Amino acid sequence: MTILTVDVVLERAIRGYDLSVEEGVVLLKETDSSAKAAIRATADKLRQQQSGNTITYVINRNINFTNICEQHCSFCAFRRDDGDAGAYWLNWTQILEKTTDGVRRGATEICMQGGLNLEAKINGKSLDYYLKLVETIKQEFPQLHLHAFSPQEVEFIARVDGISYADVIVALRDAGVGSMPGTAAEVLDDEVRRILCPEKINTATWLEIVSTAHKLGLPTTSTMLSGHIETPEQQIGHFAKLRSLQQTAIEREYPARITEFILLPFVGQEAPKPLRRRVGRDQPVLEDALVLTAVARIFLGKWIPNHQPSWVKLGLNGAKEALEWGCNDIGGTLMEEHITTMAGATGGTCMEVETLQSAIASLKRPYQQRDTLYRLVDS
Ligand code: SF4
């Protein structure tokens, strides 16, 4: 019987085998610095094989249309009740103004997500409100890619209107949504979700909605909120579920798939006190995030080749380091980030294209603009 060591596991990864959960956990539990260096080198080598040397970026603009939300996730500093100080809900003119500003600054993508606002209805229908959001943007700017509405928002619309997830996804897709953010995944483990986001959809529902999107031709991203109460076993369990979701889309020849994986390390500074106290620190531990970034590449890269760090959570320097730990994309300009900044992140709310380009150039790697679906854009 082979004893599982970091060297044995890395060798198997280099030879193209899919790692087991047990093997992934061996990598995450390693504490020795030279073994961590070997994990980094393997992730970097696999990144080179699976997605090449060029680092991509996207010019996008975030629009978070409301922070009024029916739920109370224990990590969330963004949500408000209607009437609270700081509660907001953008009107159609404001949404169009923000989109126009994004287009003027070169955006190819609008990324739109919001709180779960029970008042957001037209003629008593939640879906009609969301369709109007899409139409407001697409009527004026049909060329823009709309990356919008998480699996949790899909469930919210379906629940409020009493319709199926497929009905919601088809209507949004036909109105002009081009892809779905794989957010609200947090950690795909119901024990963790009971503490982190007890009112959110459970693991099975998240997986069902994302798989339905793939079946109906809507690509998704994938994410993980890391570095709070979860264990290494739960982290690798999350990766295994994403891998299996992608394998299903490929084996069954669904028209759409997961386009990328984004690690979102937890920022607790302004988070509600109980979770903040339990986690015991305000900002992510960079080294932990980098090791997890590398293990994500090693575990998932064969199936999900694009990996992106979060400059909002790690700062630009942390994100730059992640490009040497398995990532091949530096993300987007965002132009207006609210959700993590309200949680106390110090990475900033906007990046200029030139700043992203010079961060990449400082690593002596070529850069290239891409669109949401990783097609290269002539800049
Ligand atoms: S994370 Fe999303 S669903 Fe949860 S409370 Fe915040 S806005 Fe609402």
Image (spheres, helix red, strand yellow):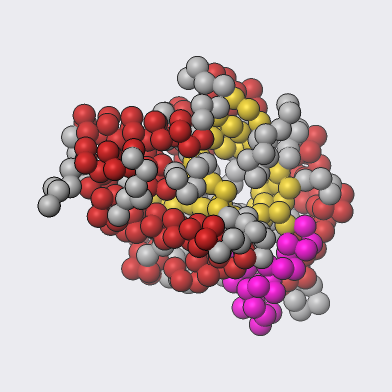
Q: Tell me if 268 is positioned left or right of 84 in this view.
A: left
Q: Is residue 160 magenta?
A: yes
Picture coordinates of residue 240, whole percent (x, y)? 38, 57
Please report the residue visible at 82 percent of the width from the left and 53 percent of the height from the top: 138
Picture coordinates of residue 130, whole percent (x, y)? 73, 65
Q: Tell me if 78 is positioned left or right of 106 in this view.
A: left
Picture coordinates of residue 181, whole percent (x, y)? 59, 54
Give the quarter of the image for residue 61.
Answer: top right
- State the quadrant of the C terminus: top right
Picture coordinates of residue 58, whole percent (x, y)? 64, 36
Q: Tell me if 56 is positioned left or right of 88 in this view.
A: left
Q: Is residue 32 above or below residue 76?
A: above
Please report the residue visible at 66 percent of the width from the left and 82 percent of the height from the top: 162
Residue farthest toward the right in the current orientation of the protein = 140
Residue numbers of the magenta segment: 151-176
Q: Tell me if 269 is positioned left or right of 139 in this view.
A: left
User: Is residue 141 visible to the viewer in this orientation of the structure?
Assistant: yes
Task: Give the number of callouts.
Answer: 0
Q: Is residue 47 above or below residue 193?
A: above
User: Is residue 287 visible to the viewer in this orientation of the structure?
Assistant: no
Residue farthest toward the bottom in the current orientation of the protein = 162
Q: Main secondary structure of the magenta part?
A: helix
Please report the residue visible at 58 percent of the width from the left and 55 percent of the height from the top: 257
Please report the residue visible at 32 percent of the width from the left and 50 percent of the height from the top: 19
Q: Is residue 101 magenta?
A: no
